[in-house]
Image (spheres, rainbow, N blue to C red):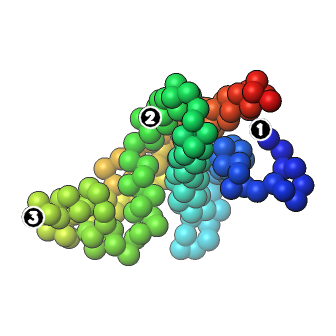
């Protein structure tokens, strides 16, 4: 990826590089958090370190999606071959298949003020508009916990395996890197 060239360099001119950098930071956050989930639980009464780390894991996994979106925007702005963006989109979908409900789960954690009342967006809003009681809508998405024996995160109606999520995060970060490498190769070829 392109390196900063002194005072003239700006992240605004290099979003594809920023996407790679951020994907790397968030991948390492995922990996560190998984290691902490595998370690002995540290009690912070009344809280569990594993339950805290499970929340961090969801946020870090979601940030990889944000990095992929930035990479896609950069590819489009640079008028890259659509096949590069297509491969990246495929990697994103594969990632989402391994971590079902990730965006909803992130939204539930960040927007707990709305989701706890059944007033969240997307699935909650659809169910509320269909006439379902807000109490029932909120209850359907409220569950969140790390299950140590299963080594999985349970989030509302979704569940994902932590080890599988870590591997999928690595693959998505690698796909972001590869897309940026394609940009560099094109720049090198065209001087």
Q: Which mark is residue 131?
A: 3
Q: Which of the two residues, 43 or 70, is positioned nearer the viewer here?
A: 70
- Furthest residue in direction right, as rendered: 6
Mark with earlier residue (3, 2): 2
Query: Where is mark 2, residue-wise?
Result: 93
Q: Residues within 10 Å of mark 3 (few under 14, many from 20)?
A: few
Distance from the alpha carbon under mark 3 to that under mark 1: 51 Å
Mark with earlier residue (1, 2): 1
Q: Which mark is residue 1?
A: 1
- Please state if 119 lies on the left or on the right of 73 as rendered: left
- Please state if 142 lies on the left or on the right of 175 as rendered: left
Q: Which of the two residues, 169 or 45, is positioned nearer the viewer here?
A: 169
- Please state if 141 lies on the left or on the right of 41 as rendered: left
Q: Nearer the viewer, mark 1 or mark 2?
A: 1
Quadrant including the C terminus: top right
* Helix, strand or loop at mark 2: helix
* Helix, strand or loop at mark 3: loop
Residue 20: in sight, yes or no? yes
In the picture shown, does residue 98 fall above or below 138? above
Find residue 168 and report its image quarter.
Answer: top right
Q: Residue at x 23, y 62 (%)?
A: 125
Q: Nearer the viewer, mark 3 or mark 1?
A: 1
Q: Which mark is residue 153?
A: none
Find residue 1 and report its image quarter.
Answer: top right
Q: Which of the two residues, 15 or 129, is positioned nearer the viewer here?
A: 15
Q: Residues within 10 Å of mark 2 (few under 14, many from 20)?
A: few
Distance from the alpha carbon under mark 3 to that under mark 2: 31 Å
Distance from the alpha carbon under mark 1 to that under mark 2: 24 Å
Q: Residue at x 72, y 55 (%)?
A: 11
**Do callouts 3 and 2 mark residues in contact (Cβ within 8 Å)?**
no
């Amino acid at each position: 990826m392109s390196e900063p060239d002194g005072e003239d360099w700006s992240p605004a001119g290099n979003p594809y590089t920023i996407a790679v950098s951020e994907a790397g930071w968030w991948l390492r956050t995922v990996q560190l958090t998984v290691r902490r989930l595998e370690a002995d639980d540290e009690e912070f009464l009344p809280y569990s370190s594993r339950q805290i780390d499970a929340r961090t894991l969801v946020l870090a996994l979601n940030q990889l999606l944000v990095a992929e979106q930035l990479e896609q925007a950069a590819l489009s702005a640079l008028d890259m071959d659509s096949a590069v963006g297509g491969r990246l989109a495929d990697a994103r979908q594969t990632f989402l298949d391994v971590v079902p409900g990730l965006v909803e789960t992130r939204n539930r954690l960040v927007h707990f003020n709305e989701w706890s009342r059944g007033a969240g967006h997307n699935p909650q809003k659809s169910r509320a508009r269909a006439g379902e009681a807000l109490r029932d809508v909120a209850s359907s998405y409220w569950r969140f916990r790390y299950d140590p024996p299963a080594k999985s995160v349970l989030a509302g109606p979704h569940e994902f395996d932590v080890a599988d999520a870590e591997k999928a995060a690595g693959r998505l970060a690698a796909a972001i890197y590869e897309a940026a490498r394609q940009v560099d190769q094109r720049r090198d070829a065209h001087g």
